[in-house]
Amino acid sequence: MQEESYYNEVFEARDFADRGFSGRDFVSCVFKDCSFSNSNLSHNEFMDSQFHACNMTTANVENTSMKNVDFIDCKLTGVDFGSCNNFLFAVNFKNCRLDYSVFFNNALQKTIFEDCMIHEAMFTDSNLSGARFQNCDLQSAAFHGNDLTRADFTTSCNYSINPGINKICKATFSYPGVMGLLDAYDIIVK
């Protein structure tokens, strides 16, 4: 990456694994089949951009701006989105692997998580109001201090959400997934 700013560019099959780039702006760019595994992507700005079939396992996104960014068919295992720049932060995920990822104090209002595996991820102190978890597997994902007002979990499974430490007003759930709201109470339902 030689330029400081990129507009309407397509990056395909590029390998940035174990290295990276900082201080770059990407506007309306598309990344396809790129590897960012263990890359340092800190202090970049991605706006109105898409990542398709990219591997971003444990990428460093500290102070990275993500404004209207879509991740499709990506592996985002262990990414700490809580370290991103939160100003105008807006992301969506479709058919992604988000295991062990961290969302801390993120503005995730109306974020769409569609057909994602989100095992052992952490959602802490984030605004997930109106977020949609469509056909997601949330096995062992942790939810602490989040605003889940009007969030939709009706087609997702394996979630465990403590209503005592998360705001769940008007959130939607379906049976049998709704039983995950009782896990914190250590009760038996027959």
Image: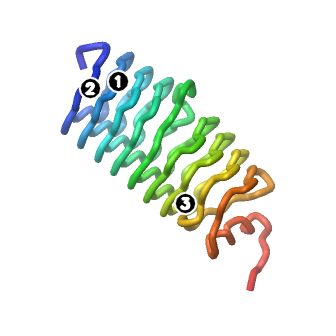
Mark 2–mark 1 CB contact (< 8 Å): yes
Q: Which residue is mark 1?
A: 27
The earlier-in-sequence mark between 3 and 1 is 1
Q: Nearer the viewer, mark 2 or mark 3?
A: 2
- Is 81 drawn above or below residue 149 in the view shown? above
3 or 1: mark nearer the eye:
1
Q: Quadrant of residue 117?
A: bottom left
Instruction: Report the amino acid beneath label 1.
Output: Val
Q: Residue 77, percent across and down?
A: 43, 48
Q: Quadrant of the C terminus?
A: bottom right
Residue 78 vs residue 166, the one in the foreground: 166
How packed is label 2: few (under 14 Cα within 10 Å), some, or many (20 or more)?
few
Location of mark 2 (residue): 8
Secondary element type, mark 2? loop
Mark seen at residue 120:
none
User: Residue 21: which quarter of the image?
Assistant: top left
Nearest to N terminus: mark 2 or mark 1: 2
**Mark 3 near mark 1, Cβ–Cβ under 8 Å?**
no
Q: Is residue 166 left or right of residue 18?
A: right
Q: CA distance from mark 2 to mark 1?
A: 6 Å
Residue tagged 3: 138
- Give the Cα distance between marks 2 and 3: 34 Å
Q: Secondary structure at mark 3?
A: loop
The location of residue 37, given as percent across then percent down, is 33, 39
| Residue closest to the far bottom | 190
Amino acid at the residue labelled 3: Leu
Rendered residue at 54%/30% (across/down): 83
